[in-house]
Amino acid sequence: MEKFEPVIVAFCCHYCAYTAADMAGSQRLDYPPNVKIIRVPCSGKVDAIHILKAFERGADGVYVAGCLEGDCHFKNGNLKAEKQVQYLRKSLDEIGIGGDRLEMVFMSAGMGEFFARKAKEMTEKIRELGPSPVHTQLEQQARQKAS
Amino acid sequence: MITAERKPLKEIMDYIQPFNRILLVGCNECVTVCSAGGRKEVGLLSSALQSAFLSAGKSIEIKEHTLERQCDPEYVEEIVGMMDGVDAVVSMACGCGVQEMARRYKNKPVFPAVNTKFMGASERQGVWAERCQGCGNCLLGITGGICPIARCSKQLMNGPCGGSTNGKCEISKEVDCAWQLIWDRLKMLGQEDRYLDIIPAKDWRTAGGGGPRKIVREDLAG
Ligand code: SF4
Ligand code: SF4
């Protein structure tokens, strides 16, 4: 079997996590290309449907990255996001995708190094978990269509 | 409002397992307000079902639609054009909406996606509590605006039982004793004498004991 390269979606808030990703870039820090970043105005803006749709389209892992506690530019969007992530982890278990494929992380705009490390850790964790069952089926369907 | 909670995914999947084309219908009223079956929940359930069936190797077609109200025939009629292309309907409305769908679209199986719970009010964001059981003969005017039928665990009509302790009901420290609430409120209103009025044995026929209930407004009914 060819090597499994996980698809990971990271919803990053504009003020902290996205800026940290930028910082990682300007510090020339390596992080896996598996992580696809989606910039959002606030982590609290990430709706359950965005996360479920990411998995429905074949993401193997998703994480929501917001500001450190107390630093959210919209007061408590990051804590709301965390509550939502905890709730959705149960839904993902119910669906059969598995709640441990979804995570919430917090960082400040200056934590470029942490951003790169988190991206690596998440990629490794998902690589170990293997492809999501949805991803596996979507690939199988694509192969059937091609042949 | 009428409150509801989504059923476990597994139960909904078992209902629709034999079918391929599903119409998932939400309702814009009570179930939207209690975050159980509005447009948003229709989207979430649809995505969850797609992923869960796909994981099990089955492709399923789900159309999503949310009606203004599912308990009124006028609105239910609106989706007549969508019915040809579907094998089964999943309704996210309360039990009234599910039944209205089943009455109108007799040749389609209709399944409920939520458990309808009670008539209640929102205590705070994300928390709903029972307030009324629709007894058909409201007592709130003599009980200080607090319902002893919906909120007293024993539906007592004339004061608390012996289990009322520090304002809590004997069934749980989390549940307020309705009669404590009633007494406190009557006192606040200076209506303590109300408490001494005996409420006679309640006639439960208006509460459903007399069979299914109906309201006919002659001035409005055609
Ligand atoms: S007395 Fe009857 S109608 Fe009034 S709130 Fe209680 S259950 Fe509802
Ligand atoms: S403790 Fe109060 S609420 Fe509970 S059953 Fe007794 S009277 Fe009713």
Image: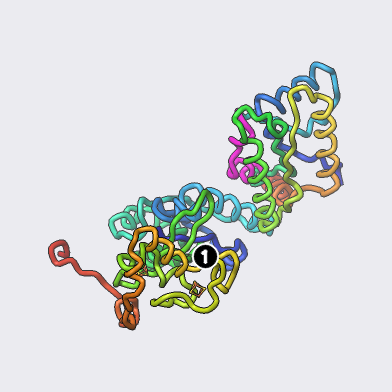
Tell me residue A22's x, y (percent).
75, 20
Query: Which quarter of the figure is the N terminus of chain B placed in?
Result: bottom left
- Residue projecting furthest to the left: B219
- Looking at the picture, does residue A41 appear above or below residue A138? above
> Would you say residue B136 is visible in this rendering?
yes
* Residue depicted at x 68% and y 49%: A86
Q: Quadrant of ligand 1?
A: bottom left
Q: Residue at x 41, y 55 (%)?
A: B30
| Residue ID for mark 1 | B176
Q: Which quarter of the rendered picture does the C terminus of chain B lie within? A: bottom left
Which quadrant of the structure image shows residue B15? bottom right
Q: What amino acid type is highlighted by mark number 1?
A: Asp
Is B60 above or below relative to B12? Answer: above
User: Circle 1 sits in a helix, a strand or a loop, which is it?
Assistant: loop
Which residue ends up furthest to the top in the rendered image?
A26
| Quarter of the rendering containing residue A12 | top right
For residue B161, above or below residue B121: below
For label 1, being within 8 Å of ligand 2 is answered yes
Q: Position of residue A82 (x, y in %)?
A: 67, 42
A13, A101: nearer the viewer: A13
Question: Which of A39/B158 is in front?
Answer: B158
Quick check: is A53 in the magenta stretch? Answer: yes
Residue sitting at x 66%, y 24%: A15
Q: Main secondary structure of the magenta part?
A: helix
Please give the range of residues in magenta.
A41-54
Q: Nearer the viewer, residue B54 or B166?
A: B166
Label 1 crowd (10 A; few <14 / some 14-19 / many >=20): many
**Rendering coords of residue A124 (x, y %):** 85, 40
In the rendered image, residue A5 lying in the magenta stretch gets the answer no
Q: Is residue B18 left or right of residue A133?
A: left
* Chain of the residue displaying label 1: B
